[in-house]
Image (spheres, rainbow, N blue to C red):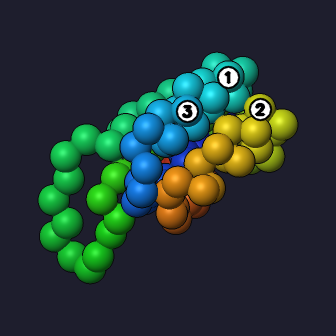
Amino acid sequence: MTKAYWVGHVTVDDPQAYEAYRQANAAAFAKYGGRFLVRGGGQEVVEGTMRPRCVVIEFADLATARACYHSPEYQAALALRLPCSLADIAIVEGYETA
């Protein structure tokens, strides 16, 4: 089974309001086994342009990653994020090595 990932690039406009989103999204990630691999650490953009915050969350598989995003738990958290940030998010299937 190939793992899947949420890859997000985020601009946070209101850090206090964004913190409410971070607390709320924990329920969805716990339920669907999401595991943070990258969560807003320092970054060096070496090509192109990106938002200042990068996030990578690992899931067991593509179906689970999609189910988490569309879940009522995450959609409730998303409603808190939308007014205080801009994001580009993709759900990406991992690469299975031999």
Q: Which residue is mark 3?
A: 20
Task: Give the structural element (helix, strand or loop) at label 1.
Answer: helix
Q: Amino acid at mark 2?
A: Glu
Q: Quadrant of residue 59?
A: top right
Say which of 23 and 71 sits in front: 23
Task: Give the structural element (helix, strand or loop) at label 3.
Answer: helix
Q: Residue at x 36, y 51 (%)?
A: 54
For the residues bearing labels 1 and 2, Cβ distance under 8 angstroms: yes
Q: CA distance from mark 1 to mark 2?
A: 6 Å
Q: Residue at x 54, y 45 (%)?
A: 5
Q: Is residue 44 above or below residue 69?
A: below
Q: Which residue is mark 2?
A: 73
x%, y% of residue 94? 53, 49
Say which of 61 and 42 sits in front: 42
Q: Is residue 48 above or below residue 10?
A: below
**Left or right side of 75 for 9:** left
Residue 27's disc is 1
**Left or right side of 44 for 25:** right
Q: Is residue 36 visible?
A: yes
Query: Along the polypeptide, which appears first: circle 1 or circle 3?
Result: 3
Q: Amino acid at mark 3?
A: Ala
**Left or right side of 67 for 32:** left
For the residues bearing labels 2 and 3, Cβ distance under 8 angstroms: no
**Left or right side of 88 for 38:** left
For the residues bearing labels 1 and 3, Cβ distance under 8 angstroms: no
Q: Residue at x 30, y 59 (%)?
A: 52
Count neighbours of disc 1 (C-alpha within 10 A) and say few if under 14, some if 14 to 19, many if 20 or more: some
Q: Nearer the viewer, mark 2 or mark 3?
A: 3
Q: Amino acid at mark 1?
A: Ala
